[in-house]
Amino acid sequence: MTDTVGYIISGLAAGLFGGYLGLGGGELLIPLLTVVFGLDIKSAVPISVTAVMVNSFSSSIEYLKKGMVDVEIVVILSIFTVMGAAFGSTINNILPDNVIRICFSILLIYAAFSFLKGRTPDNSPRINDNRKHDLRLVYLLSFLTGSVSALVGIGGGVLLLPLIYLMIRLPLNTARGSSTLIICFSSTAAAAIYFIQDRILLSVVSPVILGILIGGKIGGFLGTIAKPTIVRILFFLVMIYLAYRMISNFTGNLL
């Protein structure tokens, strides 16, 4: 019973965090499941991906209501992230746990610094972006984002958000909303594969989803009224902290 309540609270926290920043929530959920509850990362990843699928759907509804989603970008990038997610979830069962942990930590640190040092936030209604330029690199990165996100169970927002914001140059609020909807598609693809592989622990994922549904709804609403500068700073601080916790847990297992 105590663990069930803890899983609900973990889902609630991940939902709030992911919905607010336009991420999936797995960036917080994976450390909670592995560090706090002691699950091995290969068990935590399918749970996280499934919860992220639910959270991104819940959060994206709020962004769609506010008109903060670029449908054209979502459709294009979703194709590549879904293909990547299918690939990442397939190789997850092959790679050692420690490799996945290291990938997760490096990903968090990179995203934190790239986002913090990005361009000056622009929230004007007018979208003056790079969609008409050669975006083959963006498509490749979208595929890699889908692969890595399914591999480590984070949904992909930690990479998608800087990608859409810094390279395509959408306004930050629109980038958050678009990222959230793309995550919905890619995480669904990954979750389907994990379900077919019978790797989703229903006793854990059920209370996590309950919490993340509530948190995602609240976080998505708060995200629509968030200040861009606050989002960038919060994003950086949380990513660095989570990377530290994952690395500390990894090195502790080696000692």
Image (spheres, grey):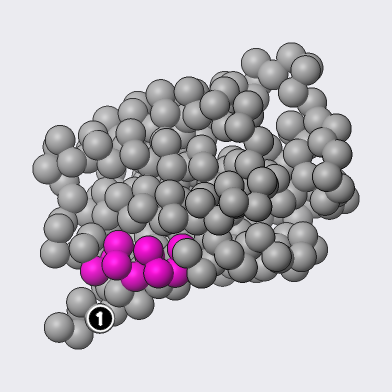
Residue 221 picture quarter: bottom right
Residue 92 forms part of the magenta stretch: no
The x and y percentages for residue 144 are: 50, 29
| Spot occupied by residue 243 in the image (x, y as percentages of width and height) | 52, 61
Based on the picture, tell me whether residue 208 belongs to the magenta stretch: yes
Q: Residue at x 81, y 31 (%)?
A: 129
* Residue under numbered circle 1: 5
Which residue is drawn at the image coordinates 74% and 33% (left, top)? Answer: 167
Q: Is residue 49 visible?
A: yes
> Where is residue 96 shown, x and y percent of the image?
28, 43
Instruction: State whether residue 226 is above or below residue 125.
Output: below
Q: Main secondary structure of the magenta part?
A: helix
Above or below: residue 152 compared with residue 141: below
Q: Determine the image quadrant of residue 195.
A: top left
Left or right of residue 4: residue 149: right
Left or right placement of residue 42 versus residue 52 in this view = left
Give the secondary structure at mark 1: helix
Position of the N terminus by quadrant: bottom left
Residue drawn at x 75%, y 55% as measured from the top left: 116
Residue in front for this viewpoint, 182 or 119: 182
Compared with 63, 167 (above or below) is above
Q: Residue furthest bottom?
A: 2
In-front residue for pair 191/75: 75
Q: Quadrant of the C terminus?
A: bottom left
The spot of residue 87 in percent (x, y) is 35, 27
Circle 1 Cα neighbour tier, 10 Å, few/some/many (<14 / 14–19 / ≥20): few
Farthest-out residue, front: 65
Q: Residue at x 42, y 36 (%)?
A: 185
Give the extent of the magenta segment. Answer: 207-216
